[in-house]
Image: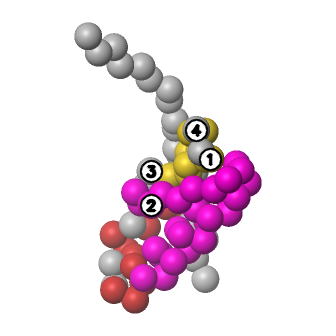
Amino acid sequence: MKVFDYTAVVWKESEGYVSKCPELGVASCGDSFDEAVRNLSEAVELYLENAKELGIIEELEESLTTREKYTAHLEANIQ
C-alpha cells in the first residue's frame, strides 16, 4: 500500500465551504469546514483508485509523495 500526501485548500463561500486538492485538480464542498474536508478526502481516494485502474497513477506519484510543499496567499489587482 502506498501513502499519498496531498494538500487541501478550503475556503468559505456564501453557501458553504469549497475544498480543493491543487495537485490533482479535484474539488468538493460541504456545509461545514469538516464536511468539505471529508468530502474532498473521499473524492481524492476515488480519483486515485480510478487513476490506478487506468494505469496512470505513476504520473501522479511525484506530486503526491514529495514532502516539500508550499502554499502562498497572493493578491491580484484588477482595474
* Amino acid on which the number 2 mark rests in the picture: Val
Marks 4, 3: nearer the viewer: 4
Q: Residue furthest front?
A: 15
Q: Which part of the image, by quadrant, shows the N terminus?
A: bottom right
The residue that appears at 39% across and 66% down in the rendered structure is 60
The part of the image, by quadrant, that contains residue 75 is top left
Residue at mark 1:
16
Marks 2, 3: nearer the viewer: 2
Q: Are marks 2 and 3 in contact (CB under 8 Å)?
A: no
Please indicate, yes or no, whether residue 7 appears anywhere in the rendered image.
Answer: no
Mark 3 neighbour class, 10 Å CA radius: few under 14, some 14 to 19, many 20 or more: few
Of 45 and 19, nearer the camera is 19
Residue at mark 2:
26
Question: Is residue 65 shown left or right of residue 53?
Answer: right
Of 64 and 33, nearer the camera is 33
* Amino acid on which the number 4 mark rests in the picture: Ser
Alpha carbon distance from label 2 to label 1: 17 Å
Residue at mark 4:
14
* Amino acid on which the number 1 mark rests in the picture: Gly
Residue range highlighted in magenta: 24-50
Indicate yes or no whether the magenta region holds residue 6.
no
Secondary structure at badge 2 equals strand
Of 45 and 68, nearer the camera is 45
Residue at mark 3:
22
Secondary structure at badge 4 equals loop
